[in-house]
Image (cartoon, rainbow, N blue to C red):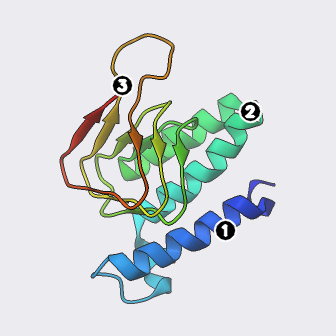
Amino acid sequence: EALEDDEIRNDIRRDLRAVEERDPACTGLPDVLLYFKGFHALVTHRVSNYLWKSGRFVLARFLQSQVNQIFQIDIHPNATIGGGIMLDHGTGIVVGETAIIGDNVSILHGVTLGGSGKASVDRHPKIGSGVLIGAGSSVLG
């Protein structure tokens, strides 16, 4: 159902192209589809975000948990992520609940987009389009 959504499918296509164009280790689209865990985590996030917005919170969090266990990438299902995203290597990436990431963003391993406190308000950072966030960076709300 989520993969029938035109916006999600378009974003996934843009993500594929982003990895192919920006990751020098990529030798072609089959590599991305089969081996790039940042791409796998991002596609799963797009499905979990769809489920979250549909009120299916338990299943959305289950997918988030599985991705975190398998790939060590923790993206909250409510985080808003644009298209054309590359999560390079992916290990250790954390994206909080109210974070917003624009289009054509590259995020390297070990990046945290974390909250500014426990208040139940908009507390995570907003990343514009065309940004590169370097390895080990922490950006707080």
Residue occupying the far top of the picture: 119
Residue placed under numbered mark 3 in the picture: 115
Discs 3, 2 touching: Cβ within 8 Å: no
One can see residue 31 in this view: yes
Label 3: state its secondary structure: loop
- Tell which circle, 1 or 3, labels the residue nearer the N-terminal end: 1
Q: According to the image, label 1 marks what residue?
A: 10
Q: Please name which of the two marks, 2 or 1, marks the residue nearer to the observer.
A: 1
Left or right for 123, reference 51: left
Q: Earlier in the sequence, mark 2 or mark 1?
A: 1
**What residue is shown at x 33% (from left), y 46% (from top)?**
93
Q: Please identify, in this view, whether the residue under mark 3 or under mark 2 is nearer the observer.
A: 3
Residue 76's spot in the image, x, y percent?
50, 36
- Dividing the picture into quadrants, the one containing residue 68 is top left
Label 2: which residue? Answer: 56
* Residue extending farthest bottom: 27
* 5 displayed left or right of 72: right
Q: Residue furthest left?
A: 136
Mark 3 → mark 2, Cα distance in angstroms = 23 Å
Residues under numbered marks 1 and 3 in contact, where contact means CB atoms less than 8 Å apart: no
Q: Residue at the spot x=77%, y=36% of the render?
A: 54
Measured in 3D between alpha carbons, the distance from the residue under mark 1 to the one under mark 3, in whole angstroms, is: 29 Å
Q: Which residue occupies 27% across, 37% down?
A: 139
Rounded to the nearest whole Å, what is the CA distance between mark 2 and mark 1?
A: 23 Å
